[in-house]
Image: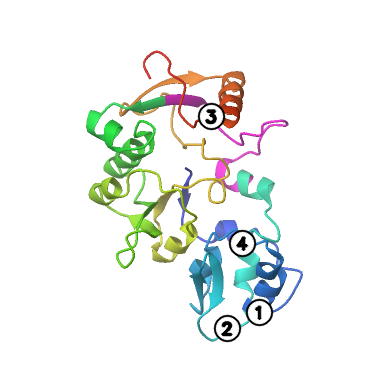
Amino acid sequence: MPIVETDRSVFALLQEPAMGGGFEQLKKSIVDHGLCAGCGTCVALCPSECIGMESSEPTLTGACSDCGDCLRCCPGGDLPMSILEQTLFGRVRDAGSELGVYQSLAIGHARDSVIRVGGSSGGVVTALLLWLLETGAATGAITVGYSAEDPLAAVPVLCRTPEQVVQSTQSKLMLTAQNVALAEAEPGDRLVMVGREHISWNPLILGPFEDPLPACIQHEHLDKREMKRESSRDRTSGISAAPRRRGG
């Protein structure tokens, strides 16, 4: 759940696409080859606002200027992880670290009993989001809510207030184009992205935070071997619950 300054410095590091053209080339090179992750980045960054999402895939909704921004930002063709990690975290992951870049690993739950019961898996994410907004460390959080038109459809939501965060609690096990919400970002925003595999590099990564974690979380640290063991156990058992340990 990285906090990212919403400027274009990260995207400036991406190389120009080898192919030319705009949306039609994006569709031909990425979408038609099954490489689209449904992240919605192209929708948010299109300067012509001519791209929309339909059935988790981008569609042309207006006149394309062939600027190529949708191809430059698309992770479907190429995702320069080392460049992104160096830009966001100041270093790249260690050799053999499939968990990515992190300061420390921990398990825990929200200290607030209402948040702990009302959230998923102990309410850790909700508690952290509320703390980040209340302390001013973040100006917003991109979470998952439900569509006003279709209450069974999950949609990305840019939360600016604690009340909005609380309304988006609980897991929604549906694919959502989270990055579409970046279109609502303002200059200078510090946003928290909440998502799973196709959004964040690993759903177990939370941060950046100073050690120890904020007081809103009852937690204890794990070493890499413990995390690997618990991750393996969850995959083989089909259970995604955190291990029961003292204080957690």
Q: Residue furthest top?
A: 246
Based on the picture, tell me whether residue 95 belongs to the magenta stretch: yes
Is residue 22 in view? no
Measured in 3D between alpha carbons, the distance from the residue under mark 3 to the one under mark 2, in whole angstroms, is: 42 Å
Question: What residue span does the magenta drawing correspond to?
Answer: 86-107
Instruction: Say which amino acid is labelled 3.
Output: Gln
- Tag 3 near tag 2, CB within 8 Å: no
Residue depicted at x 65% and y 66%: 72
Q: Quadrant of residue 170?
A: top left
**Foreground tag (1 vs 2):** 1
Residue depicted at x 58% and y 24%: 233
Instruction: Say which amino acid is labelled 4.
Output: Ala
Measured in 3D between alpha carbons, the distance from the residue under mark 4 to the one under mark 1, in whole angstroms, is: 22 Å
Question: Is residue 59 toward the left or the right of residue 142 in the image?
Answer: right
Q: Quadrant of residue 86?
A: top right
Label 2: state its secondary structure. loop
> Quick one: label 4 or label 3, which is nearer the N terminus?
4
Label 1: state its secondary structure. helix
- Tag 1 near tag 2, CB within 8 Å: yes
Measured in 3D between alpha carbons, the distance from the residue under mark 4 to the one under mark 3, in whole angstroms, is: 26 Å
Asked if 217 appears above or below 16 in the picture, the reply is: above
Q: Which residue is mark 2?
A: 64
Q: Which residue is mark 3?
A: 103
Q: Which residue is mark 1?
A: 24
